[in-house]
Image (tube, coloured by chain):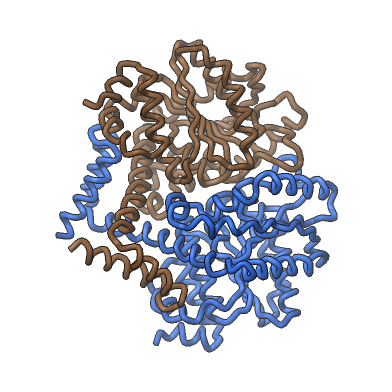
Chain colours: A brown, B blue
């Protein structure tokens, strides 16, 4: 059996850290260990936390971690940084704020950054969550900052997704983005002691009333033809969970028990409606399709000589070959190589 | 030769509209016409306009269209609606505001909505732009609303991308999103007669100074391993165009000439630095990889019997097969079918 995998199962934090580095670097070296650890996954509660810079996400994650520690649960935290130069400062601040958990051996914190590929980061995050799951952490918190698709992909790993907003981020940098709202299972207004919190709450509520269930189905089902075509619609339509809006002041530990309760409620809701398995099947299917897309393209690019590929691109640019024909041409070239 | 294609080249707006419908529905029927029209593309200036609901994007597109019409250029407009229930209201408003261009035969306006697939919408938008290009429009304006990856994918079609902001959208729904800023070639502060415009300008400038060139390279190169690995870095690094910030009041036609000039400046910059071809090659490569991913996955899903796929997903869920092994299993199943 793989040495690192054995060490992780025996509780070695060093082995865990080394494997996480391999995963982060998208190294092939992690594959064997991941495969051997995979049967040991599926026990952790996986909770995603996302929100714009300045919402106090990391303080909230810290506060949640403390609540779980009080319940004698071990906690793994993965802080994902899509490495936008625009959010670099906030991320650094987040890391510093995390230090107050560092002395507790029941908590494991790991930051992950992209090595150039957003798609790769989503894969690496899934693997990292599995590692912490296999290592026996009761709760895995996945924290991500950012805008748009990348964090949607990342939080899809989670069983419950928390979207954090904050009032009064100023006129110029704001938090509420429809695309992100749509993935929320629980909404948090952090820094709720600030002026404007009531406005933020009202805005969130009206956005929720406007269209949440449909939007949610669309986002769960996202990546297009995939889920909308193949997932029985009923599985999605049953999910008319309306996200509660919880007010917190994370740095003062205020509202955190209510948040933990809302997360529990969501979990209970999913179980009560037999949604847990269906949603996991959906996550598995999405992951599988994502991986297949990457692998199939990689394989084609490896099969087809680089000069043939450049030639095809050149011919498209010269308007001699249209992109659809180009796809067929490349598939035929691949078949030629393989036969 | 394909009848619709001939009619489009002869200037038939009805044929154009019919082809656009086929493209929007992702119907195979459009393939032949698109292939035949493809050699006739490459002449239009393609300009993307994106921004949050409430920024006055559509008024701006209208005003820009009028400027181009005064220059005796014909204008095609594609308004893309990723159909989020959250933005439905704004979109409807946009369509109504567009009516003031409807009497001009030198303008063609087309709204496009997703039929379930965001990825599909990006493909369909690329095709729609090509149709308007082949139909002889001098300028094609692609307008898209939304949040995140979907509009990044959509505006990547454009040679010049305009990101529209507005001051005072309220504390609760705001416009500036780092991920969107990163794709801007020209920044517009519309509704610049409102209070807070100067704050918005300052915030934009400081965000630009903070990290624009690197961020831009990353976003141009986005979709991961693809561009960062394969595109010579120099091609990207040469692009240290810093987006100008233009103030407009679109409904009063104020600042629109300056905006048109900024778009021209960007165009001239690209040509001066011999960037035009390199950037187009990049767009072609990204499109090709996107199409290959979709086609390769579709083909695999068609090859592998549905019950085998369900079986694999089931085995992942039971922790009997890890996702990496599952990919190999499915590839082997496909090979078995094909041999």
Q: Position of residue B158 (x, y in %)?
A: 58, 65
Eyeballing the image, is B295 above or below A18?
below
Residue B63 appears in the picture as rendered = no
Q: Nearer the viewer, residue B289 or B126?
A: B289
Q: Position of residue A265 (x, y in %)?
A: 49, 24
Q: Residue furthest front?
A: B234
Q: Quadrant of the N terminus of chain B?
A: bottom left
Left or right of B248? Residue B294 is left
Left or right of A184? Residue B99 is right
Q: Quadrant of residue A84?
A: top right
State how many labels appear: 0
Eyeballing the image, is A71 above or below B253?
above
Q: Nearer the viewer, residue A154 or A339?
A: A339
Eyeballing the image, is A75 above or below A276?
above
Eyeballing the image, is A231 above or below A73?
below
Residue B75 appears in the picture as rendered = yes
Q: Quadrant of the C terminus of chain B?
A: bottom left
- Which residue is rendered at x = 62% and y = 56% of the image? B145
Left or right of B41? Residue A310 is left
- Which residue is rendered at x = 42% and y = 43% of the image? A120
Q: Position of residue B210 (x, y in %)?
A: 68, 44
Q: Quadrant of residue A247?
A: top right
Left or right of A174? Residue B235 is left
- Which residue is rendered at x = 65% and y = 31% of the image? A55
Q: Position of residue B38 (x, y in %)?
A: 46, 78
- Which residue is rendered at x = 22% and y = 66% of the image? A336
Q: Nearer the viewer, residue A239 or A166?
A: A166
């Amino acid at each position: 059996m793989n040495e690192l995998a054995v060490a992780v199962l025996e509780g070695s934090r060093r082995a865990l850290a080394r494997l996480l580095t391999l995963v982060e670097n998208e190294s092939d070296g992690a594959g064997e260990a991941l495969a051997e650890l995979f049967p040991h996954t599926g026990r952790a509660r996986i909770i995603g936390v996302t929100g714009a810079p300045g919402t106090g996400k990391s303080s909230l994650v810290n506060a949640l971690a403390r609540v779980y520690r009080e319940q004698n649960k071990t906690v793994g935290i993965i802080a994902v940084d899509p490495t936008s130069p625009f959010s670099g400062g906030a991320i650094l601040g987040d890391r510093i704020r995390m230090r107050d958990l560092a002395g507790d051996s029941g908590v494991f914190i790991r930051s992950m950054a992209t090595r150039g590929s957003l798609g790769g980061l989503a894969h690496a995050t899934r693997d990292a969550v599995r590692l912490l799951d296999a290592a026996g952490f009761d709760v895995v918190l996945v924290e991500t900052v950012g805008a748009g698709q990348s964090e949607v992909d990342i939080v899809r790993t989670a069983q419950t997704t928390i979207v954090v907003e904050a009032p009064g981020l100023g006129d110029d940098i704001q938090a509420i983005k429809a695309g992100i709202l749509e993935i929320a299972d629980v909404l948090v207004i952090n820094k709720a002691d600030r002026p404007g919190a009531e406005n933020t709450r009202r805005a969130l509520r009206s956005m929720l009333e406007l269209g949440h269930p449909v939007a949610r189905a669309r986002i769960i089902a996202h990546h297009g033809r995939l889920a909308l075509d193949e997932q029985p619609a009923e599985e999605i339509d049953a999910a008319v969970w309306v996200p509660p809006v919880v007010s917190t002041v994370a740095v003062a530990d205020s509202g955190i028990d209510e948040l933990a309760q809302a997360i529990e409620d969501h979990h209970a809701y999913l179980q009560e409606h037999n949604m847990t398995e269906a949603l996991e099947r959906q996550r598995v299917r999405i992951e599988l399709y994502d991986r297949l897309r990457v692998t199939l393209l990689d394989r084609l690019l490896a099969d087809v000589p680089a000069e043939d590929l450049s030639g095809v691109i050149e011919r498209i640019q010269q308007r001699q070959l249209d992109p659809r024909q180009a796809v067929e041409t490349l598939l035929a070239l691949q078949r030629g190589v393989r036969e």
